[in-house]
Amino acid sequence: MTSTFTIAIDGPAGAGKGTLARRLADHYRLNLLDTGLTYRAVAYALIQHALPLDNVSAAETAARQVDLAKLDRAVLSAHSVGEAASKIAVYPTVRRILVEKQREFAKTPPGAVLDGRDIGTVVCPDADIKLYVTASADVRAKRRLAEIESIGGTANFTEILADIVRRDERDMGRADSPLKPAADAHLLDTSEMAIEAAFLAAMAVIDDVLAKRNKA
């Protein structure tokens, strides 16, 4: 790839877009950004300073201070941080600050894979590839439960499912940059698809675009 190449991956929580993004970034040797971590970083900063999540001014300040090179997935992956982040993400001013940082990241050679909720629709509407990765809420809840149990934790399936449905409603219903597929996105439903199959399906789409670009 001689020019910047951008792959935008959107979809609801638990659909497998993060794992797919990591596989694609590694395969195509592109930079990787889980944009959800940028919102989690803002939420984490507010939690650390014991500030209320509805303090928009503090959230804006925290957003300006987010360093994309220092996003600690281990710390930011906590469930409580994720819940707080989905509340922070509804603030238009916070979104604008973080979107600018995400766009700058996408412009860095040789290109990037960005995954989130509004990459193909808002952050990188001109992305070379747009994927919308989804799965049924039931399947995503089962995956989350298995993930928790795999590390020795315990959880209630019904509560996980309710949490996922609430988050979907919040993400899809917000006035600013709601979660939805871009008009030209390729849909990948992973409800009955293992990550390897999803990876191969995404690769087929990307390789086709790259082949056409090389012929141009």
Image: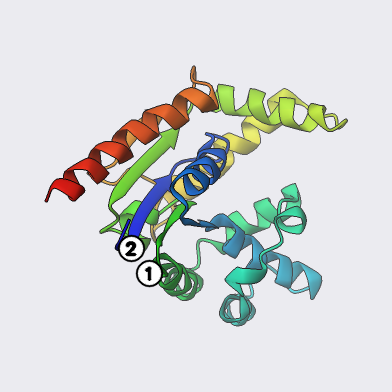
Q: Which mark is residue 4?
A: 2
Residue 136 place in picture, x, y as percent: 49, 25
- Which numbered mark, 1 or 2, is in the foreground of this view? 2
Q: Which mark is residue 107?
A: 1
Q: Which mark is residue 171?
A: none
Q: Which quarter of the picture shows residue 75?
A: bottom right
Q: Residue furthest right?
A: 152
Q: Residue at x 30, y 55 (%)?
A: 127
Q: What is the crowding at mark 2: few (fewer than 14 residues within 10 Å), some, or many (at least 20)?
A: some
Residue 182 place in picture, x, y as percent: 29, 46
Closest to the observer, 76 or 199: 199
Can residue 168 be seen in the rendering of this structure? yes
Colouring: rainbow
Q: What is the crowding at mark 1: few (fewer than 14 residues within 10 Å), some, or many (at least 20)?
A: some
Residue 158 place in picture, x, y as percent: 70, 25
Q: Is residue 106 above or below residue 205?
A: below
SS for dot 1: loop
Q: Is residue 130 above or below residue 103?
A: above
Total numbered labels:
2
Q: Residue at x 38, y 28 (%)?
A: 201
Question: With 163 as the anchor, is 91 left or right in this view?
Answer: left
Of callouts 1 and 2, which one flags the residue occurring earlier in the amino acid sequence?
Answer: 2
Circle 1: residue type: Lys
Closest to the observer, 11 or 53: 11
Residue 152 place in picture, x, y as percent: 88, 30
**Quarter of the image that includes the N terminus:** bottom left
Q: Residue furthest left?
A: 216
Q: Are marks 1 and 2 in contact (CB under 8 Å)?
A: yes
SS for dot 2: loop
Closest to the observer, 94 or 68: 68
Residues at marks 1 and 2, CA–CA distance in whole angstroms: 7 Å
Q: Which quarter of the picture shows residue 187?
A: top left
